[in-house]
Amino acid sequence: MGTVFLSTAQVYNNSCEIEAGLAYEMHKLCYSRIANPSNYFLEETAALLETYDSDIEASCVATASGMAVIRTATDPFLIKDNSLPAPNIVSCAKVYGGTFQQFWVQRSEEQGIEVRWIKNPFDLKEWESKSDKGTRFLYGKFPSNPSVTIFDIEMIAEVAHSRNIPLIVDSTSASPAFTRLLEFGADIVIQSATKVMGASGTSIAGLLIAKKNIASKVGTDEMRGGFATWAKFWHYRDNEFLLSPMSAILLLNDIRSLRMRIAQISISALKESNIRAISSRTWNRLWIKLNESEND
Ligand SMILES: Cc1ncc(COP(=O)(O)O)c(C=O)c1O
């Protein structure tokens, strides 16, 4: 288990050093809102889980909740840009209730940003026809819960990239132990680490893992180059979404058992689906019998 760095600031030698650190002119663990060793440890681990043994480079930012991570992942793409039409969001309709609320109430009703819902996420034409020059990102949840709806990540990533926008996917229910969506073309993966990643129920937390050099028609080269780090240094710094270092270490401890837990979840799910398969076979036999007796 890692060390919990609860201190708000780490050591620095003089005022010039902290000034340079806060201006991002040098890497310095000067202030915990933007640089805390325990949080870095969790972020490095989460980025590695999504990418090890692949040629993908990614970075991560940990936030105080899954809801905060959704804002961190989406806010920067909704900035005003006079050279573009008014922004809109294209999102699977089957998202987490809090996401629906954030998009529908805060974005749409309060901010006037149009949200276009995808009713059938397997329908490529629906994604294509609903996204246009004003669309800033495509958004989905993989899989949704409780209905376990999925969609073709590779196909939808192609739609996003052909429009120079990112595909953002909430993979809370799957976790990197089940699916690593960056490998299938997603640009940004977010997780409410409150759920599968953290098992012991001690921490509310969010994780955002972004590829290097993502597609986006808004923002700066720095933002596209390393979105998670950029989000932490700029967007998150000004909005205060900091995960407590204590929670970071508790989560790291939970992640140690992720693989084992997912294996057990899979065994239980397979058993459950066998029971369902058996009952549907029984039902089929009954049905045949009923039909036979009707034909007699
Ligand atoms: C899929 C999904 N995304 C995001 C969230 C929000 O996460 P949090 O409760 O950590 O803010 C949840 C919470 O249940 C969720 O299930």
Image: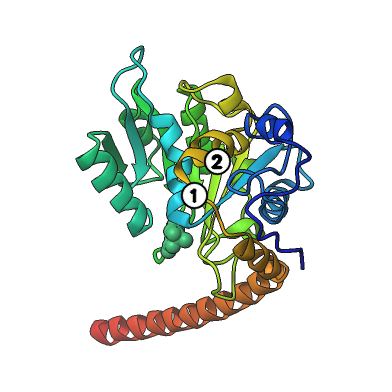
Residue 46 coordinates in the image, percent (x, y): 67, 53
Q: Which residue, given by chain and number where applicable, does mark 1 sit on?
A: 241
- Where 60 falls versus 249 (above or below)? above
Between disc 1 and disc 2, the foreground one is 1
Instruction: Assess disc 2: are there few (<14), some (14-19) or many (≥20) residues with their C-alpha within 10 Å of its C-alpha.
Output: many
Q: Amino acid at mark 2?
A: Ile
Image point (71%, 46%), residue name: 51
- Quadrant of picture, ligand 1: bottom left
Residue 141 coordinates in the image, percent (x, y): 45, 51
- Where 125 falls versus 99 (above or below)? above
Question: What secondary structure is marked by label 1?
Answer: loop
Residue that extends furthest to the front in the rendered view of this protein: 14
Tell me which corner region of the image, top left, top right, bottom left or bottom right, holds residue 6: bottom right
Residue 170 coordinates in the image, percent (x, y): 49, 51
Q: Quadrant of the C terminus?
A: bottom left
| 248 or 31: nearer the viewer | 31
Q: From the viewer's perspective, is 57 left or right of 273? A: right
Image point (63%, 50%), residue name: 180
Tell me which corner region of the image, top left, top right, bottom left or bottom right, holds residue 199: bottom right
Question: What secondary structure is marked by label 2?
Answer: strand
Whether label 2 lies within 8 Å of ligand 1 gets the answer no
Q: Amino acid at mark 1?
A: Phe
Q: Quadrant of the N terminus?
A: bottom right
Instruction: Assess disc 1: are there few (<14), some (14-19) or many (≥20) residues with their C-alpha within 10 Å of its C-alpha.
Output: many
Image point (24%, 47%), residue name: 105
Query: Would you say residue 151 is visible in this rendering?
Result: no
Residue 258 coordinates in the image, percent (x, y): 67, 68
Check residue 188 in the rendering and tell me which mark sits there, or answer none.
Answer: 2
**Display coloring:** rainbow
Q: From the viewer's perspective, is 217 left or right of 255? A: left
Mark 1 or mark 2: name the one nearer the start of the chain: 2
